[in-house]
C-alpha cells in the first residue's frame, strides 16, 4: 500500500473505506465509544503508554494528540460527527490470519483471605523485588529476568514459583482457596476477591515473569483430550476440577506467571485498569497487539459473540484499544472485555470467532 501509513513491511494491508460502507456503522450508537476514547485521550495527550511499544501502524503521536484534544471538547451527542470528521477507516487484512480472530476476557472472581489459614493456601503475589524489566530499543517488547552471578537470566517459571522460588522475594497479597481460580485470575489479568471477613477487594496486573504464554486448552486439544469445537473456559475448568494432580501438571505447562497489585479507590461499577491505565468498560474496551496498534485506537469489530441459552449473535460495534495481553498476537486480532459477573464469564469463556476489523486512523490534516 502507499500513503500516510505505509511501512517497510507490507505484510498487513490497510484498505481505506468510506464509513457508509461499513456494515452496521450508520445504526450504531457511538456515544459509549466516544466516552471510552475520551478516557484514553489523557494518556494520548501525555504521549505516555499509547506509543511505548513503537506500534507499526498509525503511530504518529502528534496526530493523535490533536484528535485527543478535540475529543475532550466533544459532546457525546456529537459522537458520530466527531469520528467521521477526525478519522479515516481502514479495513485490516492480515495474510497470516485472513479470517481474523476475536476472543474475550473478563474480571475473574475468587474466594480469599489476607492471612494463610484453613483452606486458604494458594498465594497471589505482588511484584518480586528481584524482577527486572528491560525494554528494548524503540519501545520493543520488554525482557524480564533476574540477576544471577552478574548475569541477567530468565525469571522463575510457574513451576519454580509454585515450588517456593519467591520465598522472601515477593509479598503475598492474598491467599486463595482454589488453585484453579488463581490460575484464571492470572490468565484474565485482574480479579475480584471475596474475603473471609465479608469484604471484597480487587486486584490488577502489575508485572509478569516474561515467559511465553501457553494456552493449556490448546495443549489439551493437541493431545487429543478435547475436540477443538468443544473447548471453552467452562469445559477446561471442569476438566481441571476433576483431578487435582493432573490439573497442577497441565497448568504448569504455562510457564507464564503474573504478579498483581491491590486496587484501592476504584468504584465497583468501573472495570480494572488496562495497559493504558484507564478503567476498562464492558463491550467498549478491546485488547490488541501493541506491536501493530497504539493504545487508544478506535476499532470497529464485526464478529459473532455467544449468549447464554440463546446461541451466537452478531456483534458490530466501535471499541477502543485500551489493553493488551500475551496471547493477543497479530494485526487482525482482538480480545473483547466483557466486564464482571456470570454473564461476562460465560461470554468470555465461549468467545472465539473469526471476524472483520476496521481501524480508525487520524486524518492527517
Image (cartoon, helix red, strand yellow):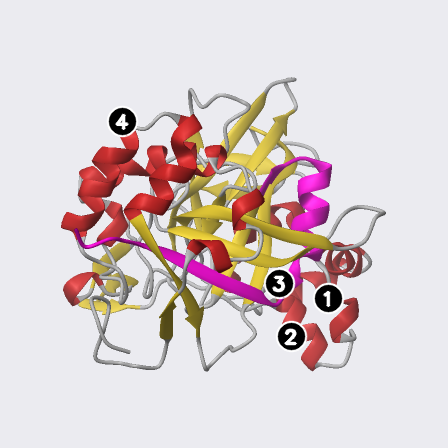
Q: Which residue is mark 2?
A: 219
Task: Identify the element where label 1 is drawn.
Answer: helix
**Closer-to-camera residue (202/331):** 331
- Dot 1 and dot 2 residues touching (CB under 8 Å): no
Q: Which residue is mark 1?
A: 246
| Badge nearest the viewer, 4 or 2 | 4
Q: Which picture quadrant has residue 168? A: top left
Q: Specify the segment rendered in magenta.
A: 338-365
Measure the C-alpha gap from mark 3 to mark 4.
Answer: 48 Å
For the question of whether residue 259 can be seen, the reply is yes
Q: Is residue 356 magenta?
A: yes
**Closer-to-camera residue (336/84):** 84
Estimate how packed mark 4 is, as few (under 14), some (14 to 19) or many (20 or more) residues with alpha carbons within 10 Å. few
Q: Which residue is mark 4?
A: 73
First of labels 3, 4 by sequence position: 4
Task: Identify the element where label 2 is drawn.
Answer: helix
Q: Is residue 344 left or right of residue 277?
A: right
Q: Residue at x 24, y 53 (%)?
A: 363
Residue 1, compared with residue 128, is above or below; it is below
First of labels 1, 2 by sequence position: 2
First of labels 4, 2 by sequence position: 4
| Badge nearest the viewer, 1 or 4 | 4
Q: Is residue 50 left or right of residue 182?
A: left
Estimate how packed mark 1 is, as few (under 14), some (14 to 19) or many (20 or more) residues with alpha carbons within 10 Å. few
Q: Is residue 4 left or right of residue 234?
A: left
Q: Which residue is mark 3?
A: 251
| Badge nearest the viewer, 1 or 2 | 2
Amino acid at each position: 500500500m502507499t500513503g500516510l501509513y505505509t511501512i517497510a513491511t507490507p505484510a498487513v494491508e490497510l484498505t481505506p473505506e468510506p464509513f457508509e460502507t461499513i456494515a452496521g456503522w450508520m445504526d450504531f450508537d457511538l456515544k459509549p465509544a466516544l466516552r471510552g476514547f475520551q478516557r484514553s485521550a489523557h494518556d494520548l495527550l501525555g504521549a505516555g503508554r499509547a506509543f511505548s511499544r513503537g506500534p507499526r501502524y498509525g503511530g504518529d503521536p502528534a496526530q493523535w494528540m490533536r484528535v485527543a484534544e478535540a475529543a475532550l471538547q466533544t459532546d457525546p451527542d456529537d459522537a458520530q460527527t466527531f469520528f467521521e470528521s477526525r478519522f479515516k477507516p481502514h479495513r485490516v487484512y492480515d495474510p497470516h490470519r485472513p479470517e481474523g480472530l476475536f476472543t474475550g476476557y473478563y474480571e475473574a472472581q475468587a474466594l480469599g483471605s489476607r492471612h494463610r489459614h484453613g483452606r486458604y493456601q494458594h498465594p497471589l503475589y505482588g511484584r518480586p523485588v528481584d524482577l527486572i524489566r528491560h525494554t528494548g530499543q524503540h519501545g520493543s517488547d520488554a525482557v524480564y529476568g533476574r540477576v544471577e552471578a552478574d548475569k541477567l537470566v530468565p525469571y522463575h517459571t510457574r513451576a519454580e514459583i509454585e515450588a517456593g522460588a519467591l520465598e522472601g522475594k515477593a509479598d503475598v497479597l492474598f491467599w486463595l482457596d482454589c488453585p484453579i481460580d488463581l490460575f484464571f485470575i492470572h490468565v484474565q489479568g485482574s480479579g475480584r476477591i471475596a474475603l473471609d471477613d465479608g469484604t471484597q477487594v480487587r486486584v490488577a496486573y502489575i508485572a509478569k515473569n516474561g515467559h511465553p504464554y501457553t494456552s493449556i486448552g490448546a495443549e489439551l486439544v493437541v493431545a487429543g483430550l478435547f475436540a477443538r469445537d468443544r473447548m471453552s473456559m467452562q469445559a477446561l475448568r471442569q476438566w481441571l476440577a476433576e483431578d487435582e494432580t493432573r490439573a497442577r501438571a497441565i497448568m504448569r505447562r504455562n510457564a507464564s506467571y503474573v504478579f498483581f497489585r491491590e486496587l484501592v479507590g476504584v468504584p465497583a461499577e468501573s472495570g480494572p485498569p488496562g495497559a493504558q491505565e484507564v478503567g476498562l468498560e464492558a463491550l467498549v474496551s478491546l485488547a490488541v497487539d501493541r506491536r501493530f496498534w497504539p493504545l487508544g485506537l478506535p476499532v470497529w469489530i464485526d464478529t459473532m459473540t455467544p449468549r447464554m441459552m440463546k446461541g451466537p449473535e452478531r456483534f458490530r460495534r466501535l471499541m477502543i484499544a485500551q489493553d493488551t495481553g500475551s496471547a493477543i498476537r497479530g494485526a487482525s486480532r482482538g480480545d473483547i472485555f466483557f466486564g464482571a459477573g456470570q454473564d461476562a464469564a460465560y461470554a468470555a469463556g465461549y468467545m472465539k470467532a473469526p471476524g472483520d476489523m476496521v481501524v480508525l486512523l487520524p486524518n492527517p490534516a
